[in-house]
Image (tube, rainbow, N blue to C red):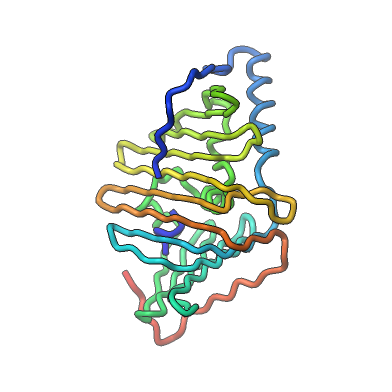
Amino acid sequence: MICCLLAMVSCKARKQVAFNPKPAGNAAASLVMSKLNEIRKGQADFNTFSGKARTSLDINGNSNDVTLNIRIQKGKKIWVSVTAIAGIEVARALITPDSLLVINKLQGLYLKKPFSYIYTYTSNQIDYRSVEALLVGNAIPQLLNEDSKFQLDSGRIILSGNLQELVYKLILGSDMKVSHTELADQAQDQSLSVDNATFIQAENRVLPSQINMSSTAKSKKVQMNLHYIKADFDLPLEYPFSIPSRYSLAN
């Protein structure tokens, strides 16, 4: 389940124009801030999100097809229910900015960890806001910073730079929607690549119906292909989560 929430793309070489190698002076800084604000406005804003997605999940070569029901209360919690064949729920997770709770209904186990447990699978630059953003096709907020290098490439915008040890690359279309996110932490031998495609409109917001994620952390490899078949914004939602007394704590 933790892996679920965490396809490299090779692009033809094109002529690229850097319009902000580094902010130099007030005019350049103003241009950067203007472009960053434009990108922020292009992201899907919401109070709540609910989505149902057919998902192919591969963890270290072990592949399964499941359905994810995802509910998000922005800034507070992410609730995920995993169902398998015949709609049988096999797992449920509740992610907050501070913690991760997962119940495995097949084995009668539960997992209780601090949010930092997610760093087993990806860089410690990924926080709760990052996970929220990736699940709805938004730009990871930390990447929209004044130190980013901007390039124009055939109508696309490419942001790249470093957050401490984390090297990042973000590709957006002319509509300011994210088509590709690439993160790499060479010191920790970790990488995360996310591709968004087939954008759809839901409740006056635009989001990708297809999200492909590929994560590598040393020997751990996870690939998830997520296809939203239903998506709604700002509906009243419930986030039921309880751990049966008979369940055992997993390591």
In the displayed structure image, the side of residue 62 where residue 226 appears, left or right: right
Q: Is residue 35 left or right of residue 144?
A: right
Percent across and percent down for residue 118 are 41, 55
Image spot of residue 212 (x, y percent)? 46, 50
Residue 172: name its quadrant: top right
Q: Give the residue drawn at x 58%, y 49%.
A: 208
Q: Position of residue 217 (x, y in %)?
A: 31, 48
Q: Quadrant of residue 79?
A: bottom right
Q: Identify the residue shown where x is 44% and y is 74%.
A: 84
Q: Is residue 178 above or below residue 217?
A: above
Looking at the image, the residue that sits furthest to the left is: 219
Rendered-image quadrant of the N terminus: bottom left
In this rendering, does residue 216 appear at all?
A: yes
For the view shown, which residue lies furthest in the bottom direction? 246
Q: Residue at x 54, y 39 (%)?
A: 142
From the viewer's perspective, is residue 84 above or below residue 12? Answer: below
Q: Say if residue 150 shows up in the picture.
A: no
Q: Position of residue 148 (x, y in %)?
A: 53, 27
Q: Quadrant of the C terminus?
A: bottom left
Q: Residue at x 37, y 81 (%)?
A: 108
Count the labels in the image: 0
